[in-house]
Amino acid sequence: MRLAAIAGLLLIVLSGCQTANSGVVRTNEPSKGDVTAFGDAFDGLKTVSDVEYYASDQAVAEAKNQFRAENYGNAGALFYKATQLAPNDGGAWMGLAASSDRIRRFDLSDHAYRQAFRLVGGTPEYYNNVGYSYLLRGKLQDARSNFLKAYELSPNDPTVANNLQLLSSSVKNLER
């Protein structure tokens, strides 16, 4: 008798677990026959994806394109987004630092260079970028020491050689 009472109670509890819908799963995507508030069909319209779902490498690629186009503010925003998506991406931190240098936000670039050094170490690219940052600030001694570190690590790098030449022309311009 006790077993029958437990089975009956279990049957009553489980019957309450049934759903009343037809099993249709709803999404935020419009159905084929849906129309907009203006009476237009949704056919051909694309929904906007959530920015937080972008991969960091996509954000970095977009940021590099903006940097090449000299849109340094946009590049910085995209590199910042990449650092939020992947905080251990040293390339994203380097890009954020370089973009911040170009818009003269040296407080941000200093922070980004510290993070980049922690992740990528003292690479020729790192020392070259830090040297260029100091060059933009007018700190020529600091720029020279970083350019020389980059040159020691990669003596055949044309970018480092060009920056050393740029530094020497900056010194000549100051002497005038």
Image (tube, helix red, strand yellow):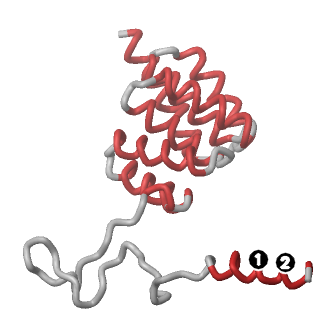
Label 2 residue SS: helix
* 136 over 40 or under it: above or below: above
Quadrant for the N terminus in the image: bottom right
Residue at image point 55% right, 44% down:
159
Residue at image point 39% right, 25% down:
104
Residue 172 placement (x, y as % from top left): 42, 17
Residue at image point 57% right, 28% down:
131
In the rendered structure, are the residues bearing label 1 and label 2 in contact, judged by CB atoms less than 8 Å apart? yes
Outermost residue, right side: 2
Q: In this view, does 86 lie to the left or right of 52?
A: right
Q: How crowded is mark 2: few (under 14 residues within 10 Å), some or many (20 or more)?
A: few
Cα–Cα gap, marks 1 and 2: 5 Å
Residue 10 placement (x, y as % from top left): 77, 78
Residue at image point 37% right, 72% down:
28
Q: Which mark is residue 6?
A: 2
Q: Quadrant of residue 45?
A: bottom left
Q: Which amino acid does label 1 sit on?
A: Leu
* 175 over 114 or under it: above or below: above
Which of 9/46 is in front? 9
Q: Quadrant of residue 77?
A: top left
Q: What residue type is labelled 2?
A: Ile
Residue annotated with mark 1: 9
* 108 over 141 or under it: above or below: below
